[in-house]
Amino acid sequence: MKNFRFIFSIVFLLILNVLPPFFLTQLPFNNAPETYLPKDQPAVILEQALRKQFPDDQVAIILFGGEDLYSDAFLQKLEQATREIAQVKSVDRVINVTEIEHINGTDDGFEVTRLLGKETRANIKDPHKRHKYAQKDAVAFGTIVSADEKFQAIIVRPGQLSSTLQRIAILDQVNNILKQHQLLHKVVAKAGPIPLEIAQFNSMIRDTIIFVPATVLIGLTLIWFMFKRLLAVIVAGVVTGAVVNSAVMLYIIFDMPYTLVSSMIPPLLSALTTAFMIHLYTNMQLASSFSYKGKERIQFAIKQIYKPAFFTALTTVLGLASLGVSPIPPISHFGLVAAGGVVLLFLIVMYAVPPLFEQLDTAPWHLPGKNNSLMKKLLGFLIHLSVRKPVWVVTSMLVIFVLGIPYIARVNAETNMLKFFNDQHRITISTQLIEDKLNGVMPLEVDLSGAGRDTFKKYKNLQQVEKIHNWLQQQPEVDKVNSIVDLIKDMHQAFHQNAAEYRKLPVNDALISQYLFIYDGENINEVVNREFDQTRIVISINVHNSGEIRAFINRISDYLGKDLGANLKWDIGGDSRLFSDQDRLLIQGQVMSLFIAVALIFIIMFIIWRKIGYAVITMIPNLSPILGIFILMGIFNIWLDMATAMIASVSIGIAVDDTIHLFHGFKKRIDKGNSAVYALTQSYYKTGRAVIVTTIILCAQFFLLAFSKFVPTAHFGLLTATGLLMALIFDLLLLPALIIIFYARSRD
């Protein structure tokens, strides 16, 4: 039986370490904006409906720079490359100066030509005149044609894709084609929704490759430093691999998108595994000091930690699982997967690890030396301060929080994807350059629907579209507006020999219908559906903060609600609408998950200690770090975004672990009839070392993430480490002071 348990543990841990990596190629990487909203959200439903009628607005904008961008040599290469890119599977359309449609007047009407196609280039030989000619096209100017002759762009628009990896594959093919045609060296910037998504993905992968091994290495190094035992290091490494690999596998099994939020799971579970193993090893070290060996040693250690470990695992699971109520799918998935990882961690440590030490662990454990003595002095000082001056400790901390509370009001639920990168990052520089030379890269659209077929062939309805178009163009957030009105004006002007006074909407419905009937270009499909009962106004905006986008959307809504009239229905969609809706859900999810976490953990505390007073006392030191985190966010202007929205629930779930370990020892001694002071002192001396060490290790592992160049990872690591450090301080100072005050009042 003993050999069976040993062999089973070896095989079980080996499978969890070896098998999952073979499936990592199937990991569903997808960091697209739509993955951050539930499918039943109005913005998502609208987006799906719009995409059935109109092209996708998730594009890649590629900016060329140089002196000869309107020369025959460059434009010929660009034309050939563009046509090859258009043939790439999943590419819907490529827009550039040689392919974009242009309406020209003729003797008997107008024709649709290519803006700088072969025929136009043959007629206009001078590159400078070609640029001036292209500038006059209302659709092209600002979209792909810059006011500066040294810059022009192409826009690559894929069809609807299901993952980030597919978008990466398309952009790689585009790069290869540009390289083959000797154009890649002319590319000075890439921006837009797709390059931004890919930049996030690359940062996520880079951080995973760097920081997951680094956090594991820190944990294993400190385990070696503390216990000087190779077996302890090997087992901790194997357990870490089993837990992290299994958690990541859940994304494959349940086909959940692996996002930048998901990438926080491996370092989180690595750190928690280290903490669990240190508590186990500390008690094995204690057992060794009592001369226990082999099976007796591991059984003693498991018996000592099983109950507190069970409840610490439970509270951590509850803190993480509370994120499961978040309406933002990646955060919900993060909470549930991480909680599942902690459950597996507990089961492995309690049931799969013991047989290994029963068989392989025979030599005495290294006992703590001078470091332990220094730690005892630190613990002695903190306990003495808390026991002797409890009111002073509590009052001082209360004053600090009161002074810090105003900063909490300064915390904004705000997201700016460009702020996820530093100012020197390629995507930041590229976006700024493209927005400087062309238009804003954030897409937004106003969707208008009529009562029946041919609604938008009628002058009175088109007049409404024009009114909205003109109002939008005047807004400071807007760089470019495109609508069916532009096309009809271009046709009307071309029909009248390009006379400037005819660039207006014709008032005759029959003439409008005639123009639209003879128009044979593709551009019309961008702005109106085939039945002409639904149209969209496409807007390029120059703001990136979700709060600014949301405020602009609200202003559009107010305007449309007052001035549109009853004959047309409206809605606002596009990538920017999806992005702005995340903030409302972030706040909703933050409040719900934190409330649930606090409530459930309080209930668990009451079940453990069987007294309301004990439950309240042990909750206060764990709620305090949450306030502290929000105060720091307010002081340093750190936004509540995708990464920081998880920190409160994660922190309280982890921080309460140390409280349980410390208070469990205290209560056990109180139940034996010891005084509060004696019970506190003994509990803190016996358990305090492991608590301090595990917290320091956790902080070191999380603080390592603060060195990431990817801001969400850095903020998650820094704030989580800070929260855990504050929790330790409150456990060692505030908790004993509260206990002394509580017992003093109980005696009264």
Image (tube, rainbow, N blue to C red):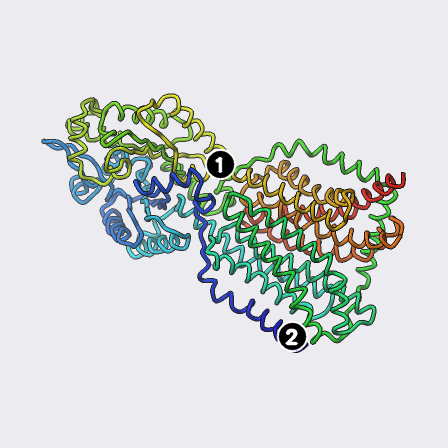
- Tell me the SS state at disc 1: loop
Question: Most extreme residue toward the left, as rendered?
Answer: 108
C-alpha span from label 2 to label 1: 56 Å
Q: Position of residue 34 (x, y in %)?
A: 43, 45
Q: Position of residue 630 (x, y in %)?
A: 64, 39
Circle 1 residues within 10 Å: few <14, some 14–19, many ≥20: some
Q: Image height check: is 479 above or below 303?
A: above
Is residue 255 at all visible to an observer of this figure? yes
Numbered mark located on residue 6 in the image: 2
Question: In the figure, residue 275 lies in which quadrant?
Answer: bottom right
Q: Position of residue 42 (x, y in %)?
A: 42, 37
User: Closest to the observer: 577 or 311?
Assistant: 311
Among the two numbered marks 2 and 1 on one chain, the one whose residue lies closer to the N terminus: 2
Numbered mark located on residue 130 in the image: none
Is residue 128 at all visible to an observer of this figure? no
User: Tag count in the figure?
Assistant: 2
Of circles 2 and 1, the one toward us is 2
Circle 2 residues within 10 Å: few <14, some 14–19, many ≥20: many
Q: Quadrant of the C terminus?
A: top right
Q: Position of residue 471 (x, y in %)?
A: 36, 24
Numbered mark located on residue 545 in the image: 1
Q: Amino acid at mark 1?
A: Asn
Q: Image height check: is 627 above or below 314?
A: above
Q: Is residue 354 left or right of residue 46?
A: right
Residue at x-position 63% and y-position 61% = 345
User: Closest to the observer: 629 or 453?
Assistant: 453
Question: In the figure, residue 182 lies in which quadrant?
Answer: bottom left
Q: Amino acid at mark 2?
A: Phe
Q: Is residue 56 left or right of residue 314?
A: left
Q: Quadrant of the N terminus?
A: bottom right
- Tell me the SS state at disc 2: helix
